[in-house]
Amino acid sequence: MGLITGLCTFLYHLPQIYKWLLKPYYITSLFMTVAFLVVRKAPGLCEHLATQREDGNSCDFDWREVEILMFLSAIVMMKNRRAITLEQHIGNVFLFSKVANVMLFFRLDIRLGILYLALCVAFVMTCKPPLYMGPEYIKYFSDKTMDEELQRDSRVTWIVEFYANWSSDCQSFAPVFADLSLKYNCPGLRFGKVDVGRYGEVSERYRVSTSPLTKQLPSLVLFQEGREVMRRPMVDNKGRAVSWTFSEENIIREFNLNELFQKSKKLNKSRGLNEEEQNSIQPEEGSNELPSETDNLEQPTESKKDQ
């Protein structure tokens, strides 16, 4: 039964996986992940490699290489227990496979190890993980617009994500936050994001550390009436983030999104009733007053992500 469930899950995500594999980042990562396997098994090349096998077969793994690969598998399984999205699972496999390949190549031949390490450095410097570009309903703040938007209407509740583009955790969390914005966004409950890696003043003002050691990125902060009500993850006395899983279920439960959404819908209905009452008031006879043109203007749409 578990095998059937796993197969169905794989087939369900197959179109998404296919799109990922077409991107240069994932194509290059895939080749670098299987590099040692290809070198060790390639006919015409593996015969010239050193081996510690008793039978002298240099085209198969020796006991030390099998031990390193098993250790890698255990680490990946442990890391993936806290992974939320499919991107995080695949990212962990790619990351620790490259680390294992560095060890295996250096053990096989120091020249191959140096070459592979140089390729890894060049890959990190030139090839970045693709950013999430799917549907969302999120307002992107800058250092000048954030305070103005939070204070604009005290009846609006904001959930703001503090993120940085260089953070892999923030990139993995992006589709989760976007999905929440599509489900819960309404006039009384809004979703926003601010890049604290770009706007350092915002990180200092709202006490969100961008240091990788503190693990405060991403941070979710709930604002009501322009004031901070709660944030996740919480921060201890040493300035380090308390471990917290950024799953959709945890966010809905901790931030009471269902309750906030119901209250926001009631606020929206009351606004609609007030507008109908105002529109039902007719101008007096003989009055030359005309409806203001500003009443017919549409509400401004959400700002789109800076490409």
Image: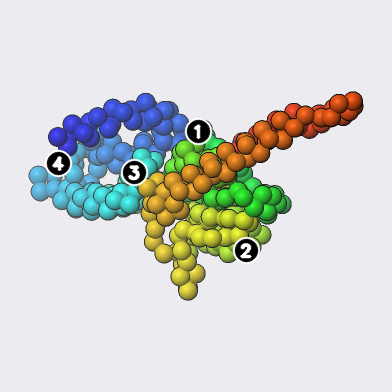
Residue at x-position 36% and y-position 36%: 30
Percent x, y for residue 165? 54, 47
Residue type at the position of mark 4: Asn
> What residue is shown with label 4?
57
Q: Is residue 16 visible?
A: yes
Earlier along the polypeptide chain: callout 1 or callout 3? 3
In this rendering, would 159 be left or right of 6?
Answer: right
Q: CA distance from mark 4 to mark 3?
A: 34 Å
Earlier along the polypeptide chain: callout 1 or callout 4? 4
Percent x, y for residue 23? 45, 31
Earlier along the polypeptide chain: callout 3 or callout 2? 3
Quadrant including the C terminus: top right
Residue type at the position of mark 2: Glu
- The circle drawn on residue 134 is 1
> What residue is shown with label 2?
204
Residue type at the position of mark 1: Gly
Query: Do labels 4 and 3 touch, CB within 8 Å?
Result: no
Q: Callout 1: helix, strand or loop?
A: loop
Mark 3 or mark 2, whichever is nearer to me: 2
Residue at x-position 19% and y-position 48%: 66
**Which residue in the rendered view is the most extreme toward the left?**
55
Query: Do labels 4 and 2 touch, CB within 8 Å?
Result: no
